Amino acid sequence: MATENNQQEITPSTEIYKTTRGQIEHYDNAINQRVIWLSIGQSFFFGVYATLVSIKAPSPDLLSKQQMLATLLPFAALLAAIFTFFDVIATLAYMRKLRGYYENAASGIASDAIYPPVYGRPIDRIFQHISPTLIPLVFIFTWVIMLLYTYHIL
């Protein structure tokens, strides 16, 4: 009878754990993909921008297109980095809510003794979030500096 009661208490916690852990893994993978896409996209923007500002003067009919691209690309790259940054921050906030939902649902059961932490230890989370939050900020900072320099504000 005691084994039956223990089994009934563990089973719902197991399902909650699996579901929550699966959702967190999904969002964690989504963050990693966004940072990879951002890095690939930024390499394209940097490459094209560097080419535009370092090549010799184009023919007169292409000069306006080159100037337009040299103006447009930094803004596009900056917006891509800003959007990715906000997307990553929103995803991290949602993952925190998922952890809270799990902790509330499993509050009556000693789930930490049975399962590993659903979202890792606090120190693990800090290190896991450094790259996805700081990489967009590095690109944002770089493009802002280049734009300020281009428009002689710096």
Image (cartoon, grey):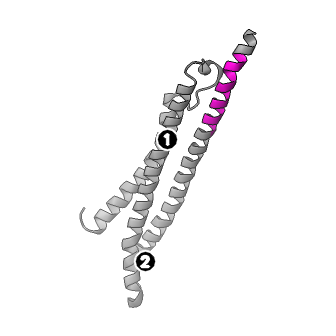
Span colored in magenta? 6-22
| Dominant SS type (magenta) | helix
- Residue 12 lies, with reference to residue 51, above or below; the image says above
* Label 2 vs 1, first from the N-terminus: 2
Q: Which mark is residue 9?
A: none
Q: Nearer the viewer, residue 126 or 14?
A: 14
- The answer to whether 126 is drawn above or below residue 141 in the figure is above
Residue 31 point in image, percent of width and height: 54, 47
Residue at the extreme top of the image, as rendered: 2
Q: Nearer the viewer, residue 126 or 150?
A: 126
Q: CA distance from mark 2 to mark 1?
A: 45 Å
Quadrant in the picture for residue 16: top right
Mark 2 Cα within 10 Å, few/some/many (few <14, many 20+)? Answer: few
**Residue, disc 1:** 94
State the mark number for residue 55: 2
Q: Quadrant of residue 63?
A: bottom left
Tell me the element at label 2: loop
Please give the name of the residue rendered at 41% of the width and 69% of the height, measured from the top-left corner.
73
